[in-house]
Amino acid sequence: MANDKLGIIGGSGLYDLPELQVIDHLAVETPFGSPSDRLIVGRLGQTEVVFLPRHGAGHRLTPTELPYRANVSALKQLGVTHLLTVSAVGSLKEELPPLTIVLPDQIIDRTVDRPRTFFGDGAVAHVGLADPYCPVLTGSVAAAARSGGVPVVEGGTYVCIEGPQFSTRAESTLYRSWGASVIGMTAMPEARLAREAELCYATVALVTDYDVWHETESAVNVELVIANLRASTAAARDIIRALAVRGLPARDCPCPDALRNAISTAPEAISPATRRRLGVIAERYLGTPEA
């Protein structure tokens, strides 16, 4: 669509997109602070793209330290409608060995220390999150992968832990008993915030290891993760390139109107300061923030 724009948050191992025709580097400020790094604005094919390195240049921020609200708010301010993230994950299933690429459709949130909503301070909203990943965007990512000859596994549950430490063996075994597919540290509250911002959200999860449950594999460590990430990053870039060439899907999903019936607080009861803080997130429903 003419006004649609693709946001990409690159996680561990994907700190740039060499194919991107860069137009500008923007230092964006939001009511929730500064994002992880400057946002890179450009084009891939005919698709407008805004790229953000999730952990900052040089990988400076832990998963807990990430400014999730500022990241999503900054992308929204720049007109992003579709948000694709690339993340390193561990596998919780034998049939998902390292170097597998998974497009998850569910999340179990085990984080404990991260702001998870744009709302509060006198404004209450309850968005639906039954399906945290947009099925339309995820389907388009799968089609793009197939068109480029990149095998992916569609569906699966992503367990998001607080980190930055990896799991204990007991935790890993517990998550396997839940039927989860992969484990990582960044899907939440990113998915929650993307839904509140009415963005279509999908993840390309790059399996780097078997976490710590697998008896015949080495326990997960940074060296192993980095080595397998290097092997998977080219495939992730191929998927992104193919998606951009094919074009973004029409937003025939609930994502663009996620807040329509979700704000419980009467607009007149929301203070000017809270309206200004919510800014582009809720201006469709609360009006333009006062100066």
Image (tube, rainbow, N blue to C red):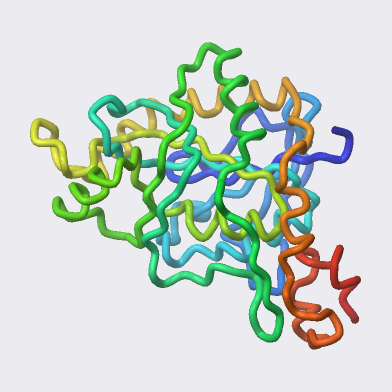
Which quadrant does the N terminus fall into? top right
Which quadrant does the C terminus fall into? bottom right
Up-down: is 195 above or below 22? below
Up-down: is 66 above or below 223? below
Q: Residue at x 69, y 62 (%)?
A: 73
13 vs 23, left or right, is: left
Q: Residue at x 87, y 40 (%)?
A: 3
Q: Quadrant of residue 208?
A: top left
Q: Residue at x 48, y 45 (%)?
A: 11
Q: Position of residue 136 (x, y in %)?
A: 66, 33
Residue furthest toward the left?
Answer: 215
Q: Position of residue 35 (x, y in %)?
A: 61, 62
56 vs 90, left or right, is: right
Residue closest to the eye, 175 or 67? 175
Q: Quadrant of residue 288?
A: bottom right
Q: Position of residue 133 (x, y in %)?
A: 57, 43
Q: Residue at x 42, y 65 (%)?
A: 64
Q: Position of residue 192 (x, y in %)?
A: 57, 58
Up-down: is 28 above or below 13? below
82 vs 184, left or right, is: right
Q: Tag count in the figure?
A: 0
Q: Quadrant of residue 158?
A: top left
Residue closest to the eye, 246 or 65? 246
69 vs 256, left or right, is: left
